[in-house]
Image (cartoon, rainbow, N blue to C red):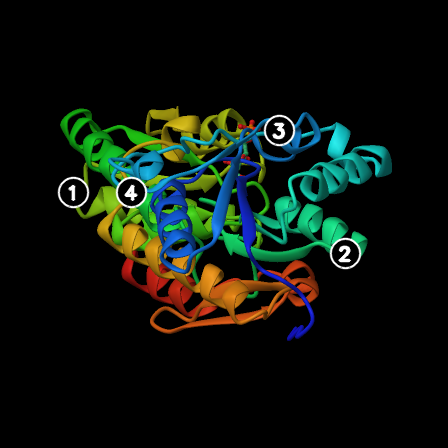
Amino acid sequence: MERENIKMESIAVLCSGGDAPGMNAALRAVVRTAIFNGMRIYGIHDGYRGLIDNDIEELKVSSVSDIMQRGGTVLGSARSERFRHEEGQQRAYEVLKEHDIDGLIVLGGDGSFKGALDLQEKGMQVIGIPCTIDNDLGYTTYTIGFLTAVETVLDAVGRLRDTSSSHGIGVIVEVMGRHCGDIALFAGLAGGAEAVIVPEVEFDLDELERKITNGEKRGKKHQIIIKAEGVQRTEEICRILEERTGIDFRTTILGHVQRGGAPSALDRILASRMGSLAVELLVQKKTGVAIATNGSELHYVSMEEAVNTPHKFNTEIYRVMRELSI
Ligand code: F6P
């Protein structure tokens, strides 16, 4: 991790993969910490696509003013097919060298970090900052953007609960997260959902039916179920529940609305701290690492560990959520 004989005068930053609220706050921190430390800082547009195409500009203090509160990323992000191949990776490395760039900070999730590792193997000094709404990186407790996405889901759940109570219908809310149920889990607990359906736990239809009918007997008029994408088809679960309970169900797929919006205070703070630490580590010539948090302090692990640590499902939160939604 510690490399004495390298220079660290010019660095670059890119965003890759799905955008996440807080990416802009992290960019602002990276750019300003770099300038504070007397470095040149370059922004690469649209992730690895922009790197291959030499779509790069030097950033100044003013390039990142007024962006902290904005969702998305002002640099643009992408999932690059060309970068998956050796030829694209080699070209990307050459572009960095042509600009005399000594270190690269990558904002993204696991796919983006794998890309950073490919560049590291070619000789680039890299640092990863975890940005994804999915929270699916096992080496860190939180990723930038996750808690904002949970807030967005909660806002929708509150609205759906109003209409669910008024009409006595049930609602299945499908949320993002690909192979990770964290958005569903956290929004389920914070939103008082009847149940969450997540890829990490086998879904017990009998238990859910019991909960729904018990609730109805107690006079409950709303039924909120939060389901992670990719578990089973939402419409199918909706039909089965209608058949089993006799209650009308509707489905709402929140989709990309979860990716946008102003980052929460916690995400802005996390992003600012992680962006600052990423540059500090480059200044200290500690590279090949990804920044992490345990929920309060920051730390870092090797890029290999970041990429290879599987996400751990929070069984304690799941238990509490199940017990409270009897
Ligand atoms: O990884 C972030 C994420 O938003 C996932 O939750 C979702 O499955 C995926 O990206 C959607 O990606 P795209 O915008 O490329 O369809």
Amino acid type assigned to the residue bearing label 2 in the image: Gly
User: What is the spatial separation of the Cα atoms under label 1 and label 2, in whole angstroms?
Assistant: 65 Å
Q: Earlier in the sequence, mark 1 or mark 2?
A: 2
| Circle 3 residue | 50
Q: Cβ–Cβ below 8 Å for labels 4 and 1?
A: no
Name the element at disc 2.
loop
> Residue 27: x and y, percent?
41, 45
What residue is drawn where x is 33% and y is 71%? 296
Report, in whole angstroms, how far the alpha carbon at label 3 lies from the one at label 2.
19 Å
Name which quarter of the figure residue 141 lies in.
Answer: bottom left
Disc 3: CA contacts within 10 A as few (<14), some (14-19) or many (>=20): many
- Kindly report which numbered mark, 3 or 1, lies closer to the viewer in this rendering: 3
Hey, which quadrant is residue 158 in on the image?
A: top left
- Mark in front: 3 vs 4: 3
Where does residue 277 sit, x and y in percent of width and height? 43, 64
**Residue at the outermost right position:** 86
Q: Looking at the image, is 205 positioned above or below residue 169?
A: below
Say which of marks 4 and 1 sits in front: 4
Mark 3 → mark 4, Cα distance in angstroms: 25 Å
Q: Please identify the quadrant where the C terminus is shown.
A: bottom left
Callout 4 crowding tier (Cα within 10 Å): few <14, some 14–19, many ≥20: many
Q: Which residue is mark 2?
A: 123
Q: Which residue is mark 1?
A: 219
